[in-house]
Amino acid sequence: MKTRSFGVFPAGLVGWRRRLAEARTRILLWYLVLMALSGLASVLTVRQLLLARLEERVEQSLYQEVEEFRQLRSGRNPETGELFGDDIEAIFDVFLSRNVPQDNEYLLTLVDGEFYKASSLALPLPLRPDSPLMTQWSTLTQPIQDSQNTLAGTVLYLTEPIAPMGNPAASTNGLFVVAHLIDRDRAEIDEAVWIIARVMLVVLAIASALAWFAAGKVLAPLRLLSHTARSITEANLTERIPLDGATGDIAELTRTFNDMLDRIEATFTSQRQLLNDVGHELRTPITIIRGHLELMGTTPEEQRETLDIVIDELDRISRFIDELMLLAKAERPDFLFPEPIDLTVFTEELFAKITALGDRQWQLEAVANGPLVGDRQRLTEAIVNLAQNATQHTRPGDTIALGSERRQNQVHLWVRDTGEGIDPADQDRIFQRFVRGRSRYRRSEGSGLGLAIVEAIVQAHGGTIQLTSQPERGATFTLVLPLKPLQEFQP
């Protein structure tokens, strides 16, 4: 039993569809369409211009012949030396013997309504003595410029009636006609235009072949980009597209793609490092919990002691996870809830909160006034983290100072201590996740995320954090925040 398969294209058709979808093919097709349209428009424009100039030239020729005929009529007969007067036939004979018409141009004369002579013995059908056009001319009494469509083509003509000079009111006894069969000239123009069109087709074919190779050369970086993109995996993020000093749009695209790969590689590296650091941080409390549970005694006192240790480690894991979630939320648009903050009240509230963190000499160095637009809770968290960090690098009796100040369009909030300071080699890395500063005074109980959280909060406000420190001379952490006017606040 035979079955029919619908919706499946033959392999050849699929190949052609894929080829037509390629950028190189589409560029060539658009190039061909534009070239063909521009070539067609050019050919048609040239043809119309040539036809217009032909009609203008023919019209000038007609007027020139009539003007020459008028000048001859007012002159003298070369045979007798006397004026022509009313000798119409003599005028026609002399004029036809002296004037040679242009190609496709005919000089015709009529006497008393009858054909007399012409500049050519072989007249075309529309200009013969028995033609309808000749009959029409035999009755003319006024000069006429007109055209007539005939079986042999279009005839452009100009007539000049001649009346006896002694009696202008008498009936016309002579007619001079200049006629031109313009279709023959038009045929020559059409032939020339057709030659131009064929030449343009050949040029278009050659230009298309060159455009195909040129498009391939221009799009080569895109094919390399596609190949590089296919070769990139999670295990191989080092591939890059070479620029080799190239410039232009393709080079800019390549540079942008390489920059994107750099960011992706940095993100993957950061994620791997994060997973490694998280695994390392969680391994210790889990090991402690497991070890104490395995060695838990049977007495209530031993069980209570083990339970307290387990709960403490679980709390530490919970705080660690909360800090990680806070860092993850820092990149979300709803991380901050800005509101107008009174700097004076806010600074005093911060000072009241941090003084409970330890036995230190707490000082309020400066208090700024005026409004600040920011997230009160996040900024409080940042300052408390800095103060907590200061207590871990100072001893009882050392000074920890808090201050705020307005400087032009910025607000400076700082926490300063007189502790052991930070080594210059560690100042660039302590804001990284899971990096703990070394302290001679006490073992750090944090997760190494405190300063990273502070930096994330400051950056979310559009500000920066500055560190000034020297060993044995303490450290100063300064939050530099933009002072946004209240009218920019949007609840």
Image (spheres, rainbow, N blue to C red):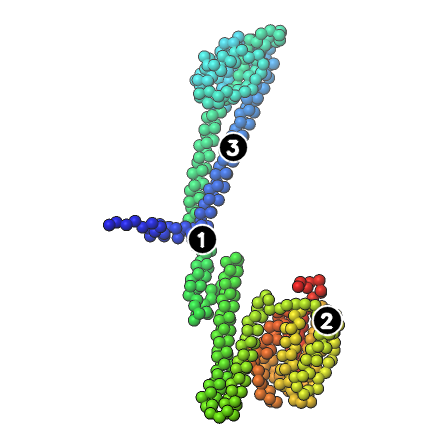
Is tag 1's residue or tag 2's residue first in the polypeptide sequence?
1
Q: How far apart are the alpha carbons under marks 1 and 2?
A: 59 Å
If the image is split into quadrants, where does the C terminus sit? bottom right
Which numbered disc covers residue 48? 3
Q: Residue at x 48, y 44 (%)?
A: 34
Q: Nearer the viewer, mark 1 or mark 2?
A: 2
Q: How far apart are the alpha carbons under marks 3 and 1?
A: 37 Å
Residue indicated by mark 1: 23
- Looking at the image, which is closer to me, 47 or 12? 12
Q: Residues within 10 Å of mark 1 (few under 14, many from 20)?
A: some
x and y percent of residue 408 in the render? 73, 69
What is the residue that sits farthest to the left in this orientation? 1
Q: Secondary structure at mark 3?
A: helix
Q: Identity of the amino acid at label 1?
A: Ala
Q: Quadrant of residue 401?
A: bottom right
Instruction: Establish if 150 lies above or below 403.
Output: above
Q: Identity of the amino acid at label 2?
A: Asp
Q: How far apart are the alpha carbons under marks 3 and 2?
A: 80 Å
Is tag 3's residue or tag 2's residue first in the polypeptide sequence?
3
Q: Is residue 80 left or right of residue 368?
A: left
- Looking at the image, which is closer to me, 20 or 217? 20
Q: Secondary structure at mark 1?
A: helix
x and y percent of residue 1 in the render? 24, 50
- Looking at the image, which is closer to me, 269 or 78? 269
Q: Residue at x 50, y 81 (%)?
A: 282
Residue indicated by mark 2: 342
Q: Identity of the amino acid at label 3?
A: Gln
x and y percent of residue 444 in the render? 58, 85
Q: Secondary structure at mark 2?
A: strand
- Looking at the image, which is closer to me, 254 or 422? 422
